[in-house]
Image (cartoon, grey):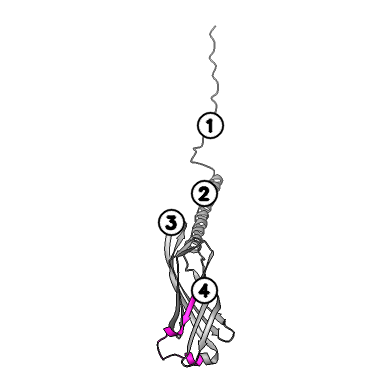
Amino acid sequence: MTEESQSWPLAPNRIHHRSDEENPAFKAIRKERSNKCFIYVFATIVFLGLILLIFSLIVLRPKSPDVKIRSVTVKTLHYTTSPFPSVNATLVAEISIENPNFGPYSFDGSSARILYGGQKIGERRFGKGRTETRGRTRVRLTMDIRSSRLPEGANNLNSDLNNGVLKISSYAKITGKVELIKIINNRKTSEMKCDMNLVLKTKRIKDLRC
């Protein structure tokens, strides 16, 4: 007896889609995510660039210190109008050096002058120093002023002495080095120009303007 061969129906072939034949909706989602990622990266770069720009403009941009006279007191005063006009006085001035930078300012030695009619009648030197970050340094100077240092004639000394008020001014020039983040060193120069009135009767300084 011969066994009859049995034939089984073949299973239907399954169609496998290729990976590059993705659903259009999935493609759109992935493209949107890629675009968002690019936008985030670009925004981060722009933000960091703005921070660096602000940092360089505020912190790394050295500024000249502010130098001015805070106060002037009259220690001694002698004057006369006859037989010839003359005045001798000793002034005590407090000069402040304010450093606006984000780094210390080291200044060289310099001098402060007292002027009358644009002519020097007194001068005092002071040594080098250092002003810390966004700090202030005070320099106290005692200066002798002598009218004998004026050139003869061409001044209103006799008239001013009779009026009781001597109009004088002060001048100083300070040069130093600003140190930023211990890498950048930049030299800066500041000038001080102040006007004031020496009242002879009360022996006081009035109307100090810098």
Question: Label 3: which residue?
Answer: 183
Q: Position of residue 3 (x, y in %)?
A: 54, 10
Whole-number angstrom distance, CA of label 2 to CA of label 3: 41 Å
Single out the mark in the foreground, 2 or 4: 4
Q: Nearer the viewer, residue 194 or 201?
A: 201
What amino acid type is highlighted by mark number 1? Arg
Q: Secondary structure at mark 3?
A: loop
- Tell me the quadrant of the picture where the N terminus can be found: top right
The tag earlier along the polypeptide, 2 or 1, is: 1
What amino acid type is highlighted by mark number 3? Ile
Mark 2 touching mark 3, by CB under 8 A?
no
Question: Label 2: which residue?
Answer: 34
Q: Position of residue 93 (x, y in %)?
A: 53, 74
Single out the mark in the foreground, 2 or 1: 2
Whole-number angstrom distance, CA of label 1 to CA of label 4: 92 Å
Q: Find residue 68 and name its label.
A: 4
The tag earlier along the polypeptide, 2 or 4, is: 2
